[in-house]
Amino acid sequence: MFDELTGINRRPEPYEFYTASDLWTDEYTSQRMLEYHLNESVDAASRNCSFIDRSAEWMIQYFKLGPGSKVIDFGCGPGLYTSRLSKSGADVTGVDFSKRSLNYATEEARKNNLSINYIHSNYLEYETDEKFDLAIMIMCDFTALSPAQRGTLLGRFYKILKSGGYVLLDVYSLSYFRSLQEKAVYEFNMMDKFWSAGDCYCFLNTFKYDDVKVILDKYTIYSKSDKRTVYNWFQCFSKDAIREEFDKSGFMIKEIFSDVAGSVYNPESHEFAVVACRV
C-alpha cells in the first residue's frame, strides 16, 4: 500500500506522459465527454452555448468568412464551431480523434443540410494537400501539448495555410497559473462517476512546475477491474512566450484578445486568444 500511495503522489517530469487520447477513445469516458460538450449551460469540454454563438459570429466578422473561405477546426469535437461557421457559406473541415464526437457532428450536419468535411485523425499526424484561409483550435487544447508537440502542430498549420492565412487559438495565462494551488484529493466516484461506469476510487494530484509555468492534473483511478492514470497538462503563457513559439514557426502574431470572441485583452484573464498570420 505504501508503494501504491508513493506512485499515486509521484510528481512526473513536465509532459513525461501523454494520455489525452484516453479521454476521447475510451468507450465510457468518450460518452461522458460528449455529454459535457453538449451541455449548453456549462463551460466544461466546450464553453456554454451563448459564448459559442458570440464567438462564432465574431470569427465570421473578423476573418470575413463566407463563400470562398476555407476553414479547418483542429479538435472540432461534435461540431459546435464547424456547424456555425459553415452557415456563413465557408467551406469547413473538422479534424478530431473521437469517433463518437464525429459521428454526432456528421449526423447534425446531415440534419441541418450543412456540407462539412469531418476527418477522423490525430491532428498531430494529419496531412492534406488542401490550403486553408483559417485554422482554429479552441478550448485551450494547444496548452495540453508538450513543447515538441506544439512545434509539430504549428508546422502543420504553416503547411496547410495559404500565404497570409490565419491561426486562431486560445491558451491559459500566467494569471491562471498564479490562481491555482497544488493539492491532493481523494474521492469515491469522483466527478459524478465520470471515470467509470462502475464504482471507482479516484485520486487527483495537482502539481505546479514554476520554472516552466506548467500545471498537471494527475488522475489515478481504481475500479474493480483495473487501474489507470490520466495526465491533463496545462502550459500557461505570457504574451512574450507565445510570441516566441509562433515566431519560430514562421508566424507573426497580429492581435491578442482575452478570448476567442474578441474581448479586449485583460492581463488578469485566466485565458487569452491569439490571432497569428502566416508570413
Image (tube, rainbow, N blue to C red):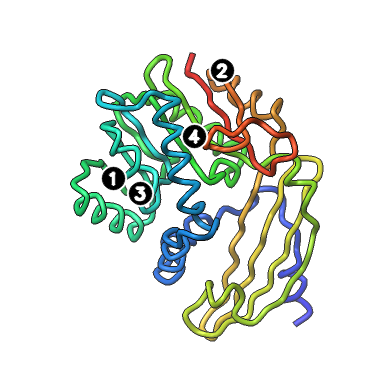
Question: Disc 4 or 2, which lies upstream in sequence?
Answer: 4
Residue 43 bears which disc, if any?
none
Q: Would you say 188 lies left or right of 114 here?
A: right
Residue mark closest to the camera, 3 vs 2: 3
Q: Can you tell which quarter of the image residue 220 is in?
A: bottom right
The residue pinned by badge 3 equals: 79
Choose the circle earlier in sequence order: 1 or 2: 1
Residue 252 got which mark?
Answer: 2
Q: Quote the CA–CA distance across marks 1 and 3.
A: 9 Å
Q: Where does the image place residue 178, in percent across and percent down from the top left?
A: 80, 46
Which residue is found at the position 33% from the left and 57% from the top?
99
Estimate how packed mark 3 is, as few (under 14), some (14 to 19) or many (20 or more) residues with alpha carbons within 10 Å.
Answer: many
As drawn, 214 above or below 238? below
Quarter of the image that includes the N terminus: bottom right
Alpha-carbon span between mark 1 and mark 2 = 29 Å
Camera-nearest residue between 135 and 120:
135
Image quadrant in which you'd find residue 148: top right
Amino acid at pointer 2 = Met
Which mark, by number, is residue 153? 4
Relative to the observer, which residue lies in front, 20 or 82? 82
SS under mark 2: strand
Which image quarter: residue 158?
A: top left
Say whether residue 114 is left or right of residue 245: left
Question: How many other residues sit within 10 Å of disc 4, few (<14), some (14-19) or many (≥20)?
Answer: many
Percent of width and height locating residue 115? 21, 41
Element type at marker 4?
helix
Q: CA distance from mark 1 to mark 4?
A: 19 Å
Query: Where does the image place residue 123, in percent across and percent down from the top left?
Result: 42, 42
Real-space Cα separation, disc 4 to disc 2, in angstroms = 16 Å
